[in-house]
Image (spheres, rainbow, N blue to C red):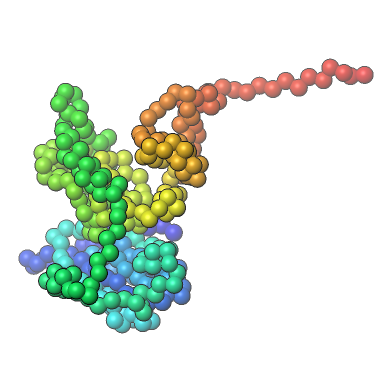
Amino acid sequence: MTRPILTATPNDTSDDPPYAVAALYRFVRITAPSALRDTLQKSMTEHALCGTLLVAEEGINGTIAGTRAGIDAVLSHIRTLPDCAGLEWKEGTATEQPFHRMKVRLKREIVTMGQPDIDPRATVGAYVEPGDWNALIAADDVEILAMRGDAVDAAMDEDPALARALVLGDPLDSETTLGPLITPKAADFVRRQIVEAIADGATAHVDAGAFERDAPGSAYLAPQVLGGVGHAMDVMREESFGPVIGVMKVADDEEAVRLMNDSDFGLTASIWTSDAEAAIAIGERLETGTVFMNRCDYLDPALAWTGVKATGRGVTLSALGYHALTRPKSFHLRTDTG
């Protein structure tokens, strides 16, 4: 199924921001997610909305943007679905379309976290106003569960600092440590991935304004480290070819392998560990052409450079790389003719 690239053209000529942005969710049992995806995609297309909607068996959520009339029409359509009259959403406005395209995706789960017995319709808690949080956590009968993610926390301390230290500039300048992308179009593609990720809940940890050469429409792009990303975001699933990285916590190696293999691409994978045996064990389970340990995309003439899935076309380097440059010739000689 193709995903149209849409841009809404608002008719509003007032001083109000022309785009409405709605973040929505509804926990409800969905028996036919694929059919609902098609229905929602048709409605989004008809009203020229952009953004992302996720559909799973336990509900629907996402963030969409477009004209006031278009948002109202799609929200009204969702509220007509079975058990969706109580749809909840929050709204904002924007002077420019914050999303590049429209996506309606099936998601294996939204909130159940791999536990099929969890039913968010039955166990959802009470909403707590931001101003009431301090009093809540100070109460004697409230316990706080802290989830450890030491490696991720360390990365979020170190990676943004390393990114901020880069010097974006002319590659012919000896002071430059980060040059431009290949074209302005390529840079704007990555910018849209970053904007969409932030709109879907990610947090940017590098101030792009600190990089003078970074400007929309130019090939110069500031580096970015995104926290709070989700697996459904394009920045985590699609190719970027730019200086952006999303940092995502996982429960264990099993979840990491599952998410890494849940991709249309499979050129390289990078595993960072002091345990070489663990890197090999994980690497053998990854659907990728090359597995790196403690480095990435380092070319070795002795190793084949190849991939699988959408990046599995051909091979270069190593003895295998010469096969495409040779023409095989076979001899079948029968010497015993008696």
Residue at the outermost right position: 338
* One can see residue 106 in this view: no
Q: Position of residue 240 (x, y in %)?
A: 31, 44
Of the 4 image quadrants, the one containing the C terminus is: top right
Q: Residue at 46%, 31% (x, y): give it.
A: 305
Q: Position of residue 178 (x, y in %)?
A: 21, 33
Which image quarter: residue 300? top left
Q: Residue at 13%, 39% (x, y): give it.
A: 211
Of the 4 image quadrants, the one containing the N terminus is: bottom left
Residue at the outermost front position: 140
Which image quarter: residue 311? top left
Q: Position of residue 198 (x, y in %)?
A: 22, 56
As drawn, 109 above or below 248:
below
As drawn, 147 above or below 312:
below
Left or right relative to 308: residue 294: left
Q: Residue at 31%, 82% (x, y): give it.
A: 85
As drawn, 159 above or below 38:
above
* One can see residue 113 in this view: yes
